[in-house]
Amino acid sequence: MTNDYKVLYRKYRPTTFDEIVGQKYSIAMLKNAVENNKISHAYIFTGPRGTGKTSTAKIFARTINCENPKNGVPCGTCSSCINNSNNADIIEIDAASNNGVDSIREIINNVKIAPTYSKYKIYIIDEVHELSDSAFNALLLTLEEPPSHIVFIFATTDIEKVPITILSRCQRYDFKKLTNEELKEHLKNIATKENIEITDEALEEIAYLADGGCRDALSILNQLCTSNEHIDLDTVLNNYGSVSMAQIKNIVNAYIENQYDEIKNIFDNIEKMSIDYKVFLKKLVDQFFQESIHFKMNGNNEMYLKIKDTIFEFNDIINKININVDPFLLIFLVLIKNMEVKEVQPTNKEKETILEDKSPIKEEKTIDQEEAKEQITEDVIPEKKEEKTTEVKEEKDLTNEYIEQLKKVRINNCFAKADKSILLKSKEKWQSIKENSSIDKEIESIIIDTNTVLASNEIHIITDIQESIVELFNTHLEEIEKQYKDIVGEEIHFIALTTEEWEEYKKDYVKKLKEKYVYHYLEEPLKPVVQDDKQEAKENLEEVISIFDKEKVEIK
Ligand SMILES: [Zn+2]
């Protein structure tokens, strides 16, 4: 990046509290501290990047060093103010580039020396979370007994990484993301001063893309105005791979109205454009959120719940997007899936009513056995599918869903007959498989870092692996089981879980144990046919669906 990139940002860097964009609360409190002359020895400003932490730290430092600040504004005439441009009493350190203990030792040695022109010697340490442990320890010594003329102002984008021992000695100020209105207003003022021709819609889009960060907003404006005489919405969308809010609203409306064709059209077009799917997904979620509030306020609980579920599903696919092929396909699938749900399944509200009708007098604290069984059964039955769904969706969803159902059933069945002594033996056998030279190389790469955590005579549960490997493991179950049989001579079924999933199942197991829940043996779901020939597969698929539809999974 050239320096031009930062021109606007530098030029319009705030120099007084009133020029800081947003952060009304923090600024008011800091001004208050100056006016009442209640200065602490350490402050920490935390918040996302580009929200004004460092600018505020500099302004605050100048203000508390001024001899006659008026309404929280430095006087400009005292010795501290006059020497401000070359002020030896305000020392700025970027911890990201000075994270060693040596630079902190230097600070500590110098803190004893009194300030030159001002009341305080002020250390502004930016990105303080980057300091090393030993640097933090050295810093802590000074913070425990600071000389009266010392003030530390720490800024951080990652407060979680700052040790609690440091935090407990600081006054904390939380800097918030700027609202789109605040950013838009700020951009508009600057555009006017700089004679930049820009439309309101373009300003709004930049504000949206900047995601609450003033620096990012100005960088975008800066880049656009260097290569465009006139900036309109299309300029922004084209340069930043974005999609207009109007388009997003079309998708959401089509979803609400169950207009499948409309959504299909929009997604067909999207594929031809180079759109950043992250921005796309964020906009979509934001718009869905707005709609969910709208439906909630109007008492349309059914739509509210439907949209809420969709938002959660979008959240779930964010992880999958990182490892999967086409992000837009996943987004599309979530939309389509929930559009059908409404036609096929009872709404959550209806489900609740059904449950209430079945057990009008609920016993507290004990699980109703029948109800628990029903819930498990319900979980195990794959959802009914409509014919008009796309083939891709059917295939992918069926496989994923099958694995999810299989997971539940196998874990349930393994818990039902789990045995510690089998587990110990199975661990040995598993190890011998990994070390066996005749094992298939691909399978070896999948199972190499795994661990058996639960075992019965028929089922072994495998974990301690990354999510992507879990997926690979479970889509290669048959091959793994075959290899196991060939090498160990036992017919065992496997299923793999992420560590988080396993922790959840364990918790659930302990909970059920306390409630004297009995694990019933469950039938395994049928495996969907993955096709080579499309027509044949379609028929098979329909056959499988019709079986799922009629057949209930039995509890023995
Ligand atoms: Zn002054």
Image (cartoon, rainbow, N blue to C red):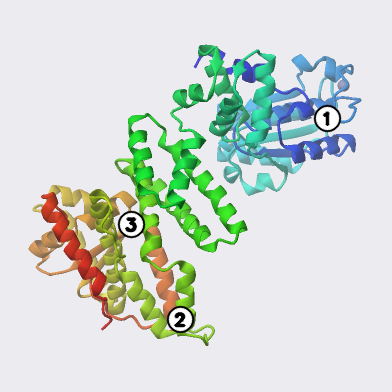
Q: Note whether 330 is above or below 39 in the view shown.
A: below
Q: Amino acid at mark 3?
A: Asp
Q: Amino acid at mark 1?
A: Ile
Residue designated by label 2: 514
Residue designated by label 1: 64
> Can you tell which of label 2 and label 1 is closer to the viewer?
2
* Left or right of residue 148, residue 340 in this image: left
Labels 2 and 3: the sequence-earlier one: 3
Can residue 448 be seen from the camera position used here? Answer: no
Residue density around tag 1, few if under 14, some if 14–19, many if 20 or more, within 10 Å: many
Across and down, in percent, residue 508 comes to 42, 71
| Depth check, front residue: 155 or 411 | 411
Name the quadrant of the C terminus. bottom left
| Depth check, front residue: 262 or 147 | 262
Q: State the CA–CA distance, disc 1 to disc 3.
A: 54 Å
Residue designated by label 3: 464
Residue depicted at x 34% and y 43%: 264
Residue depicted at x 15% and y 62%: 481
> On the image, which quarter does residue 405 sit in?
bottom left
Mark 2 near mark 1, Cβ–Cβ under 8 Å?
Answer: no
Across and down, in percent, residue 195 comes to 65, 12
